[in-house]
Amino acid sequence: MIIIKTRSLLRKYVKSCRSGGGKIGFVPTMGALHEGHIELVRQAKQGTDTVVASIFVNPTQFNDPKDFQKYPVTIEKDILALEAAGTDLLFLPAVQELYPDGTLELEHYELGYLETILEGFYRPGHFQGVCQVMKRLLDAVDADRLFMGQKDYQQCMVVKRLLHLMGSHTELITCPTVREADGLAMSSRNKRLTTEQRARAIGIYKALQRIQDLAGKKGIATLKQDALRILEDHQFRTDYVEIADGITLQPVSEWSETQKPVALIAAFQDEVRLIDNIIINS
Ligand code: AMP
């Protein structure tokens, strides 16, 4: 695996790979890698000829500075894991490389409704930061296929919108959420949980399962209440439990309002914020 730290070298490398007719797959991450990330690399290997991964903890997408400071960093382990999974190139830029003029006055993206609901509502500015970094990374990598996780459902929708705004040729491939044996969605933030919090964190998956199991049989408002109660029982402080249309992400109040319902949760164990979702088989 080659490690590159500058955009100019990365562009050169990608250009030479592409000149042989090969397709480029890209897996952007913020490091502290787990099986969920590695599965994205595996999908990219299956679907493309050259796999580029990136590790960059993007300061502009953290609306909470404490969350940024405490974001786990395990770079040596990450490099070994990416190499073992067959990554061809790791892009490892410094903040200065992606934001040479600083991070204060950056461009704004028209994300519309997506920015006003759920993660957009509870993390103001977060999706602007996601777009700012993804635009820079996508410009540098110029991938044919971009591999991202369903765990960040709304982020995938935002990135799809960004690709449209950019007039990009890159195709977004959304990969299923990889879970721990007990169902907890893998997340870099899980590393910050104490043993007790980790045990209670399963509450999110239990709440989602409750909705999944009784979808169509019980009303949406009742199931959202049930889910909230499960979260409370596991000492979660909940930002939202929502059932929405999987295409538009508009909340629904009746099952008949959507063909593809998705249940989404964001909740805190103390100061660690976790998100998860489930596409409901109706
Ligand atoms: P992050 O490093 O958290 O920014 O995540 C990098 C990419 O990995 C994003 O596309 C995430 O959606 C994806 N990802 C994170 N956790 C999982 C998971 N448990 N399963 C699948 N993909 C994931």
Image: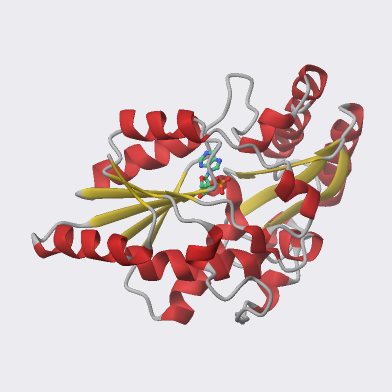
> Residue 62 versus residue 25: which sits nearer the camera?
62
Q: Does 180 sit left or right of 87 as displayed?
A: right
Colour approach in the figure = secondary structure
Up the image or down, 252 lies above or below 277; here it is below
Up the image or down, 273 lies above or below 138; here it is above
Q: What residue lies at 36% left-to-right and 41% top-to-bottom? A: 41
> Residue 150 versus residue 279: which sits nearer the camera?
150
Residue 88 figure quarter: top left
Rendering coords of residue 171 (x, y %): 35, 64
Rendering coords of residue 153 (x, y %): 59, 53
Q: What residue lies at 23% left-to-right and 49% top-to-bottom? A: 50
Q: Does 46 sit left or right of 126 as displayed?
A: left
Residue 22 figure quarter: bottom left
Q: How many marks?
A: 0
Quarter of the rendering occupied by the N terminus:
top left
Rendering coords of residue 27 (x, y %): 40, 50
Q: Does 67 sit left or right of 136 as displayed?
A: right
Residue 159 visible, this orientation: no
Rendering coords of residue 208 (x, y %): 71, 37
Q: Does 235 sit left or right of 104 as displayed?
A: right
Residue 1 visible, this orientation: yes
Q: What residue lies at 58% left-to-right and 51% top-to-bottom? A: 57
> Residue 68 versus residue 207: which sits nearer the camera?
68
Q: What residue lies at 75% left-to-right and 47% top-to-bottom? A: 67
Residue 63 figure quarter: bottom right
